[in-house]
Amino acid sequence: NGNYFDFIVGDDGDDPFFNYHEMFRSGVDWDTSSVPDTATVTNTELRVYVPNNTWQYGEFIGTNHFMDVHNMELSYASRSAAAAQYADCADGPLYLSNLYLNMGAAGASSAWLDLGTTADATVQSQLGADWFGVGFVENDAPGKGIVLWLDWSTLRVTYNRPPADPTLLGQFKANGTTVIAVGATTNEPTVVVKATVSDPDATDQVGLQVEL
């Protein structure tokens, strides 16, 4: 909708003479309710939007900073205290280390950043809760900070959906047409089992497996 919010990460460098610095971290959650709870997550990627290098929020600029990206273990709704939010940005598993963002004069999104298999497992485990979050933590020299527009940033989750249940399941004699009723017997050594199977993911292959 064109709106944006400044998220700041790093050291504001207010008064280095008196060694008075304030450190900032930022976190963001995504709604993953569009991913079915029964899906199998295969990849989780992040694209971060950074404003142009003349954009300023106080001492923070829109470019040129190293940071780490961690898992947020508490959803935004459950992080009531500022201290809990600040700690949660850094105390979860590390997904990206020394991430460097410098988008230059125009401002842009980063490349797609693969968060790794640990993130895949976390997204998978939280499908029922419908959220996933990451925290951005400073990893740079004192007196440096960056502005991020996390509401313009994107999470991409790749997943496979389970196949549909078989339909028109039936068992037949060797000719493939004579029905063998459930619980009935046959005097032939061959039984033909038929069903219609389908998979919602067009690139997947699906087959019927019968256990005797």
Image: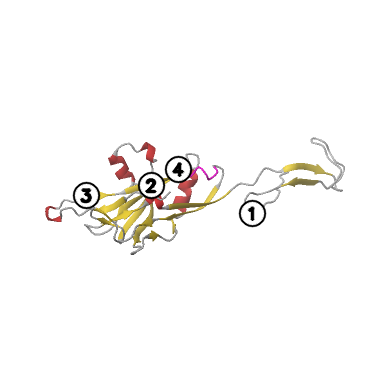
Q: Earlier in the sequence, mark 3 or mark 1?
A: 3
* Residue lying at the far top of the rendered structure: 183
Q: Secondary structure at mark 3?
A: loop
Quarter assignment of residue 171: top right
Task: Tell me, yes or no, whether the two marked residues, 3 and 1, touch with CB atoms within 8 Å.
Answer: no
Q: Secondary structure at mark 1?
A: loop
Question: Looking at numbered disc 4 in the image, what kind of residue is underneath it?
Answer: Trp
Disc 1 and disc 2: Cα gap in Å? 32 Å
- Please report the bounds of the magenta region as a residue range: 31-36
Q: Give the labeled residue for mark 4.
A: 131
Disc 3 and disc 1: Cα gap in Å? 51 Å
Task: Tell me, yes or no, whether the two marked residues, 1 and 4, touch with CB atoms within 8 Å.
Answer: no
Question: Looking at numbered disc 3 in the image, what kind of residue is underneath it?
Answer: Glu
Q: Give the labeled residue for mark 3.
A: 22
Q: Earlier in the sequence, mark 2 or mark 3?
A: 3
Question: Looking at numbered disc 1 in the image, what kind of residue is underneath it?
Answer: Ala
Task: Say which mark, if any, is on residue 28.
Answer: 2
